[in-house]
Image (spheres, rainbow, N blue to C red):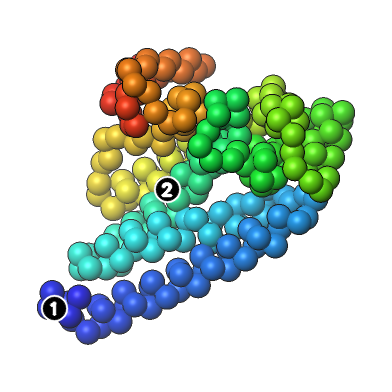
Amino acid sequence: LKLKKVDDSTITRVMETIARHGTTACAGQHYDLAWESKPFIHEAQYFKMTRMKSASLVECACCVGAVLANVDEKTVSSFSLFGRNLGIAAQIANDVSGVASVGAEPLRKSDIIRRKKTLPVIFALTHAGPQDRSWLSNVYSTNGPVDPNAERGVAELLRRSGAIYYSMVQAELYKHKAVQALKKAGLSPQVFEIESLAVARALVKNGISPFPLLLIDFGATRTSFIIFSGYSLRFTSSI
């Protein structure tokens, strides 16, 4: 930054911002690891951990960018809030991918195998039927590997209990908050791919397709069309 002729006060602020958010992210990672051994965590705890571990780094990047652009404090705050909400939305979308891709032989282990208490699992442990809650709690509290049948059973439970749908709605909510934060900064975002990416990760085997795939997401008030090819999205539109 010094070579780019950034003034000392700005460099100091950038360093302080990175240090503060980095420390917050480390504390969030500590919570994530510490809570793995707990039989149950509340949704409020999940969002606290997500804000600290995942969102703080995105918030940091957005804040530093705004500071280096030498904008006013209101705009810096808007960009920071944008990054925070975007980071939370992205983490929730990743959580959905970690449980919805079971059966597609993903290259990485599912979050179910790792017994991570992500948002879909927390929702099911709270809102599923009594028998489902008891069975799910047993799977997540038992030592030893999770066998494939149990993994598929958990994935199906999360689908039918509405846990995956609820989590995707939460991701959309935070995406909306992120957009509103940008609008306060005087910007009007045109495209956000979080939901489309989550759908693609959940449905495309191994995250790769040798030929174009058309994915259609039917919602209550809109329908989304997603074209995926190779390793990435090629087109997305909603009507």
| Residue under the image location 43 percent in, 15 percent down | 216
Q: Is residue 165 left or right of residue 86?
A: right
Front residue (pair 197, 11)? 197
Front residue (pair 111, 2)? 111
What secondary structure is marked by label 1?
loop
Picture coordinates of residue 101, whole percent (x, y): 56, 30
| Residue under the image location 55 percent in, 25 percent down | 104
Q: Is residue 40 left or right of residue 54?
A: right
What secondary structure is marked by label 2?
helix
Picture coordinates of residue 31, whole percent (x, y): 65, 62
Query: Which residue bears the numbered disc 2?
Result: 86
For residue 215, the mark is none
For residue 3, the mark is 1
Picture coordinates of residue 171, whole percent (x, y): 50, 38
Does residue 92 sit above or below 184 in this rendering?
Answer: above
Quarter in which the C terminus is drawn: top left
Residue 20 lies in quadrant? bottom left
Residue 145 lies in quadrant? top right
**Residue type, label 1:** Leu
Q: Residue furthest bottom?
A: 8
Does residue 179 sit above or below 238 in this rendering?
Answer: below
Does residue 111 sit above or below 68 in this rendering?
Answer: above
**Residue 127 in sight:** no
Give the Cα separation between the discs numbered 1 and 2: 31 Å
